[in-house]
Amino acid sequence: MTIDEDCKRGTPRRKAERPTEILHAAFEEFVLTGYAATRLEDVAARAGVTKGTIYFHFQNKENVFNQMVRELSKPMHQRTQQFLDENQHCGIEFLSSYLDFSYAEVLEDRHAREILRLLIAEATRFPDLVDEHFQYVLHPVFMRLQQTLADGVRDCRIRNTPAATCPDLLLSPMLALNVFLLVFADRKPIDPKKHLEAAKDLILYGLLPRKA
């Protein structure tokens, strides 16, 4: 019995799960072949449904891609927001905690790693989706980092340096690790713990006030 036949026989739970199953199958196909080369026939085969079932839930391949990015990004967005809500530390302490958190996300969330790669590759095709991803996933982090740096400079806990006005630089080590993992996978092993320690040494000590 196929999934579609199972649905027709009256299994509402399976029917409710169908869109999510399709999006997860689409994710694997987009990662494997890229957006342009991905066919909805292949997504349907991977999901165990007919192509018509995909069109019942989604308008077209573009809509599948948009909804895939939104749905699979939700857990990361929720964890990030929870981290921001629960960590009320100031200055260097918060920045150090954020680096710990961001590295853990890169290592543990394959969806987040691959979606970033897909968004970079398809930025010109999906500019609104890229902007939306930034607004909901990265913008809250940027705002918190910017405020932390500004407060640290005001309280003389962080050096008044051009680096204190560029919160995006604090994401650079995490992005570098993300790219390395995506490009080299298991071919060129990297020690994430050592990478994190180096990032903290480079960034956090660089922000500390200089001794007179």
Image (tube, rainbow, N blue to C red):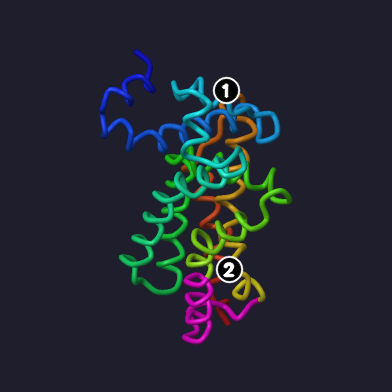
The reply to whether the magenta stretch includes residue 98 is: no
Q: Nearer the viewer, mark 1 or mark 2?
A: 1
User: Pointer 2: residues within 10 angstroms few (<14), some, or many (20+)?
Assistant: some
Residue at figure coordinates x 44%, y 61% from the top left: 96
Q: Residue 210, located in which quarter of the rendered image? A: bottom right
Give percent across and percent down for residue 110: 48, 37
Q: Considering the numbered disc 1 on the image, is that residue within a helix, a strand or a loop?
A: helix
Q: Is residue 151 above or below residue 104?
A: below
Which of the two labelled residues, at mark 1 and mark 2, occupies the earlier sequence position? Answer: 1
- The residue indicated by pointer 2 is 167
**Who is closer to the viewer here, 20 or 80?**
20
Q: Which residues are magenta?
A: 143-161
Give the amino acid at mark 2: Pro
The main secondary structure of the magenta stretch is helix
**In the figure, is residue 117 to the left or right of 85?**
right
In terms of depth relative to the viewer, which is nearer, 28 or 82? 28
**Are the residues flagged by discs 1 and 2 in contact, CB closer than 8 Å?**
no
